[in-house]
Image (cartoon, rainbow, N blue to C red):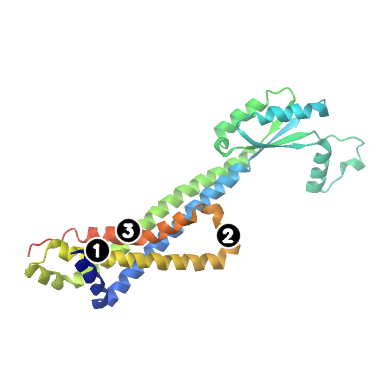
Amino acid sequence: MILFWLKEAFKLIGRSKFSFLLVLISITLSVLLTTVSFFIIRFSNHFEAQVKNNIVISVFLKDDIEQAEIENIKSELSQLNYLSSAEYISKEMAVDIFIKETGDDFRKILDYNPLPASFNLKLKSDYANSVSIKKIIKNLSTYNWVESVVFRQDFYQKILSYIDQAKIYIFAITGLIFLVSLYLVYSTVRLIFNSKYSELETMKFVGAKLSTIKMPIILNITFTGLLAGFISLAIVWVAYYNIRMYLVSIDQIIANKLEFLFLLISLGPIIGMLVTILSLRKISLKI
């Protein structure tokens, strides 16, 4: 029986080449639209992680801190579980940074260095939120070697809030795109079924089983979806090959490429099979 279904499924392609082409194009568009949405979501997550991993809190040290105490301070900071790194900026390094950023050399006027030594602290991404940052700043301010704690809160908060808002829109657009793509395939499949209505009715008259009517069609669309998956994979690869110089590395967005390839190829058959089953739900042996 399975062999019969497979033979009939492939015969459908030969008997209705135009319908096969319509379904193939529809499913391919559906897979491509879903893939684009997937890339946008992963890229926004990657960008958010990059922002969070680069949030810096500057801790300025008191002037009376001896150089010998710096190692003890480093040791204290290394024990804080919310920090991913702590970079020490000496007074001399602070001068170089100031001159590089402003272009002014105050040493021509002043005979001493007014800039304090400091630590640039980077937070772990789990703690890169407004609630945690406020607690961290409060905690850092309690150390007796701290003169002041500086954090560009408004800047980072705006970026993170923009990312959160963008993700809401992206998820909404992704859902809309997926529904539109499913409807596109569904409409195409229904159009094909309507064109074959008389053929299906004839099969009912000769006593064909419901599985004999439905399964070849389901297998036909599933095979078409598989082909659409491979076509989509080829299009995605060609597109990435031509624009890769303008994008971040794909390794940073997609860690497991084999898993992504499997999902991309299997998405077509899944969409095709589900939509076909949905389209066939009203078909019965009643004449």
- For residue 163, above or below residue 128: below
Marks 1 and 3, the one that precedes in the sequence: 1
Q: Kindly identify the residue that appears in the image at 56 percent across and 45 percent down.
A: 49
Q: CA distance from mark 1 to mark 3?
A: 11 Å
Q: CA distance from mark 2 to mark 3?
A: 29 Å
Taking depth in this image into account, of 215 and 111 the one nearest to the observer is: 215
Q: Amino acid at mark 2?
A: Leu
Residue 252 relative to residue 101: left or right: left
- From the top left corner, tell me how far across and down residue 154 is, in percent: 61, 39
Q: CA distance from mark 1 to mark 2?
A: 39 Å
- From the top left corner, tell me how far across and down residue 241 is, in percent: 54, 67
Q: Kindly identify the residue that appears in the image at 35 percent across and 65 percent down.
A: 226
* Numbered disc 1: secondary structure: helix
* Numbered disc 3: secondary structure: helix
Taking depth in this image into account, of 138 and 212 the one nearest to the observer is: 212
Q: Amino acid at mark 3?
A: Ile
Between circles 1 and 2, the one closer to the viewer is 1
Where does label 2 land, which residue? 247
Residue 37 relative to residue 151: left or right: left
The image's mark for residue 278 is none
Mark 2 residue crowding within 10 angstroms, few (<14) / some (14–19) / many (20+)? few
The image's mark for residue 218 is 1
The picture quadrant where one finds residue 228 is bottom left
Marks 1 and 2, the one that precedes in the sequence: 1
The picture quadrant where one finds residue 209 is bottom left
Where does label 3 land, which residue? 270
